[in-house]
Image (spheres, rainbow, N blue to C red):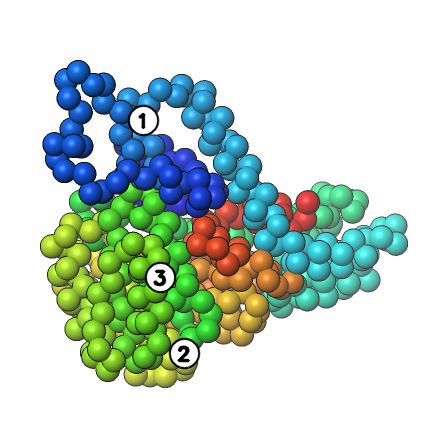
Amino acid sequence: MAFWRRKKDDFVSLGLSRGAEKRTTEVQPESKTETEATPSAAEPAENPVRSPWQTSVLGLNLSIEDLQAQEAALEQEFSARFRRAVAATRESLSEKIDTVFAGAKQIDAALLDELEEALIAADIGVPTTMHVLETVRRGISRKEIDDIAKLKQAIKSELLSILNASEQNGVASEASVPESIAPYVMMIVGVNGVGKTTTIGKLAQRIKAEGNDVLICAADTFRAAASDQLAIWAERTGVPLIQQKQGTDPAAVLFDSMKAAKARGSDVLIVDTAGRLHNKSNLMAELEKMKRVAGREVEGAPHETLLVVDAVTGQNGLEQARQFLKIAGVTGIVLTKLDGTAKGGIAVAIAKELGLPIRYAGIGEKVDDLVVFDPEVYVNSLFN
């Protein structure tokens, strides 16, 4: 499973969940001269190392079977990490559902009422819960659901269906934009305190690790600490940062960043935006201006507008998403702090009520604890 990449022909993505300490030893020094970097005729060339997370198929000594085995092992590790991250939600939801089912001999109205309370308590939300239970009731009336095991499976299937359907909207994959269009522009929006700056740093690190040249644009000039925080992440990840003094027009900072990204041949430009309250009309005007600037410089930019939502905030996070969808043209969600809440069902509520894909999930504090959101792994982790 690739974290982020548009270059699909020459690479096999490996190392989705490996520790940073293992990967950093694989990075080749960038300080070599052209003479030093070119092997002599008497010396065999080493296998080219594209990046710590991207291994070239060409010249690789591993067999296809070895590659597949490594990929399978990494996906297993990813699944285990994701399962641990949603443990609080699983314990809350599963315990409530198991309590509902414990004394049940049959599926009746009383059981469905208790099930409704359990789903709402996990922040799956009232509208989404009603939708799930309506589907369940139809299955019961058709005699397709006649025992508790089938009822639990029906709930799982419906939640997965909701999450999969949301990927038909917004932007579910960066690969939809041709590689010839560069830089790929990602605007990151969200209110202060949801983990926006941290998300940008983690995104930059992970996208760079997939073999891409990344640039960060510090366009949140409203808050003095924003650029300082981004500068720390930029230094930590080794990703260049374009910033100007506080109060500068954000669109001007973006314009300079777009020019710099094109000049250096960057693959990806990640743009921070002001995190003011989502009901402020001036933020809407600011974002619209930035989008116009981006679109003039690169075809189709911004290619993604990602809203960062704190999973701990639950239904308030859903309301933020509704407001930003109106003013910012959000194409996908980054759900942070998924490991720190018993109300991780908000992912399903967002997918159902807004029709937006959950693109990434924050499952810890480390730089590597930002992963591609996998609906099937998520749903299985909630129940198994």
Query: Which one is in front, 63 or 188?
Result: 63
Q: Earlier in the sequence, mark 1 or mark 3?
A: 1
Query: 247 left or right of 237?
Result: left
> Whole-Å distance between the Cαs marked 2 and 3?
25 Å
Residue, disc 3: 233
If the image is split into quadrants, where does the N terminus sit? top left
Q: Amino acid at mark 2?
A: His
Q: Amino acid at mark 1?
A: Val
Query: Which one is in front, 103 or 57?
Result: 57
Query: Does residue 257 appear in the picture of this structure?
Result: yes
Please, is residue 381 above or below residue 39 in the view? below
Q: Earlier in the sequence, mark 2 or mark 3?
A: 3
Depth check, mark 1 against mark 3: the one in front is 3
Residue 270, given in percent of the width and then of the height, sits at 29, 60
Depth check, mark 2 against mark 1: the one in front is 1
> Could you say whether the residue bearing mark 3 is in a helix, strand or loop?
helix
Q: Which mark is residue 223?
A: none
If the image is split into quadrants, where does the C terminus sit? top right
> Could you say whether the residue bearing mark 1 is in a helix, strand or loop?
loop
